[in-house]
Image (cartoon, rainbow, N blue to C red):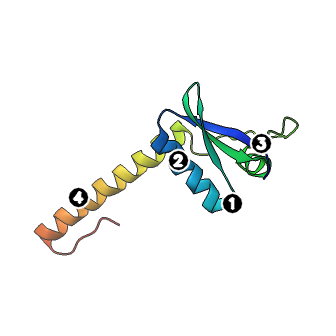
C-alpha cells in the first residue's frame, strides 16, 4: 500500500469520511482518515494529491484583459435602447389613435 499524505482537514468525521469516499471512488484508489489537530484529516496517495493540487506556473504570461464593454459604452448602449423604446412607444400610441402610423 502506498504512503498516504494529508489532502485536507475537516472538523467532523462525517464530512471527512464523505470526502475520502468521494476521492476513493473518483480515483479508484485507497484513501484514509486519521485524527488531526483540526479534527479529521483526509489521506490520499501521492498521485491523487498531485492530480488535485493546482500547478502554479510563475513564468506564464497572462493577457491583460480589458473589458471591451466599459462603463461609458454600456451607458451609451442603454441610453440608445431607452430612446428606441420611447420612440416605439410614441409610434404605437399614434397608431392606436390615428391608425397605423410610424414615425419613419
Mark 2 to mark 1 CA distance (whole Å)? 15 Å
N-terminal-most mark, 2 or 1: 2
**Disc 2: which residue:** 17
Which one is nearer the viewer's eye here, 52 or 15? 15
N-terminal-most mark, 4 or 2: 2
**Disc 1: which residue:** 27
Residue with the most extreme top position: 37
Res 96 quadrant in image:
bottom left
Mark 4 to mark 1 CA distance (whole Å)? 64 Å
Mark 2 to mark 3 CA distance (whole Å)? 41 Å
Mark 3 to mark 1 CA distance (whole Å)? 34 Å
1 displayed left or right of 79: right
Res 103 quadrant in image:
bottom left
**Disc 3: which residue:** 63
Of circles 2 and 3, which is in front? 2
N-terminal-most mark, 4 or 1: 1
Mark 4 to mark 2 CA distance (whole Å)? 65 Å
Classify the position of the C terminus by image quarter.
Answer: bottom left
Of circles 3 and 1, which is in front? 1
Residue 91: x %, y % from top left: 24, 63
- For label 3, the crowd category at 10 Å Cα-Cα, with few meaning under 14, some 14 to 19 and many 20 or more, is few
- For label 1, the crowd category at 10 Å Cα-Cα, with few meaning under 14, some 14 to 19 and many 20 or more, is few
Asked which secondary structure carries label 4, the reply is helix
Residue with the most extreme right position: 59
Asked which secondary structure carries label 2, the reply is helix
Which one is nearer the viewer's eye here, 79 or 36? 36
- For label 4, the crowd category at 10 Å Cα-Cα, with few meaning under 14, some 14 to 19 and many 20 or more, is few
Q: Are marks 4 and 1 in contact (CB under 8 Å)?
A: no
Amino acid at each position: 500500500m502506498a504512503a498516504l499524505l494529508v489532502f485536507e482537514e475537516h472538523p467532523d468525521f462525517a464530512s471527512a469520511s464523505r470526502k475520502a469516499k468521494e476521492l476513493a471512488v473518483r480515483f479508484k484508489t485507497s484513501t484514509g482518515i486519521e485524527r488531526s489537530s483540526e479534527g479529521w484529516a483526509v489521506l490520499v496517495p501521492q498521485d491523487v494529491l498531485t492530480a488535485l493540487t493546482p500547478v502554479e506556473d510563475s513564468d506564464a504570461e497572462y493577457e491583460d484583459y480589458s473589458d471591451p464593454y466599459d462603463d461609458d459604452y454600456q451607458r451609451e448602449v442603454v441610453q440608445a435602447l431607452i430612446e428606441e423604446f420611447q420612440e416605439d412607444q410614441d409610434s404605437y400610441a399614434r397608431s392606436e389613435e390615428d391608425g397605423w402610423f410610424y414615425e419613419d
